[in-house]
Amino acid sequence: MKLNDKRFWIIVIPISLVIALLCGVIFYRHNIEFEEIGRVKNTKDNHINNFHPYGFVLIHNESDLEYYITCLDSMPFNTVEDFDLEKYSYLLTFGNSVEKLSYSWYDTFRYDVSPSYCKVWKNRNELLIVDYPDFTYREISVDNVSLMGNDSIYIYRLPHLPFLRGFQGL
């Protein structure tokens, strides 16, 4: 086939469009609107509540809420008057405020470091990407202990997105 052959272009153009569309869907990063609704200082000083810098948890339902209330001794939850788990999901970050929240299929596949038995993409859940001011975990290893946050717990409200998950099994 020659480059000026009409059949060549009839085949190449649709294939190129399909590839571009697939790349757009796979790599598109969905940004999530959020608002900070509370912040408390971590006053607990025991090994159970020593947080990994840049850690976070998502709360989507009543069982998640009850679990984290028992884990955190209800300290951050006292600042929130009403948890509306039908309309909103909640994000707790430990040690730093949030600059941006997003998710994409590519980020889920590429950056999920959960053990293989609990990979979130196997369950059709997507990994929440939390970008903190002056730090994104994609650039620096989270094992670097020199990356210390403060001793606050931040609470954010975001739209109810139950398919979002953090790292699991770590």
Image (spheres, rainbow, N blue to C red):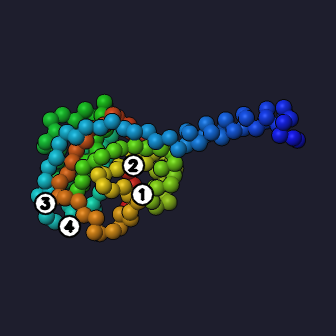
| Residue for point 24% across, 64% down | 148
What's the residue type where badge 4 is placed? His
Q: Which residue is mark 1?
A: 138
Looking at the image, tell me whether mark 1 or mark 4 is earlier in sequence order: 4
Q: Amino acid at mark 2?
A: Ile
Q: Which residue is mark 2?
A: 129
User: Disc 1 or disc 2, which is closer to the eye?
Assistant: 1
Crowding at dot 2, Cα within 10 Å, few <14 / some 14-19 / many 20+, comes out as many
Q: Please identify the quarter of the rendering in which residue 3 is found.
A: top right
For label 4, the crowd category at 10 Å Cα-Cα, with few meaning under 14, some 14 to 19 and many 20 or more, is few
Q: Which residue is mark 4?
A: 47
Q: Is residue 167 visible?
A: yes
Residue 49 in percent (x, y) is at: 20, 61
Hey, which quadrant is residue 13 in on the image? top right
Give the left or right position of residue 167, taking residue 158 as reference.
Answer: right
Asked whether residue 56 is in view, the answer is no
Answer with mark 2 or mark 3, whichever residue precedes in sequence. 3
Cβ atoms under marks 1 and 2 closer than 8 Å = yes
Q: Measure the C-alpha gap from mark 2 to mark 3.
A: 27 Å
Identify residue for label 3. 44
Pick out the residue farthest to the front.
4
Identified at 46% across, 55% down, the residue is: 111
Between label 1 and label 4, give the one nearer the viewer: 1
Judge depth for marks 4 and 2 and give the one in front. Answer: 2
Q: Three-letter amino acid code at disc 3?
A: Lys
| Above-or-below relation of 164 to 133 | above
Mark 4 to mark 3 CA distance (whole Å): 9 Å
Which mark is in front, 2 or 3? 2
Q: Quadrant of the N terminus?
A: top right
Secondary element at tag 4: helix
Question: Which amino acid type is shown beneath numbered disc 1?
Answer: Arg
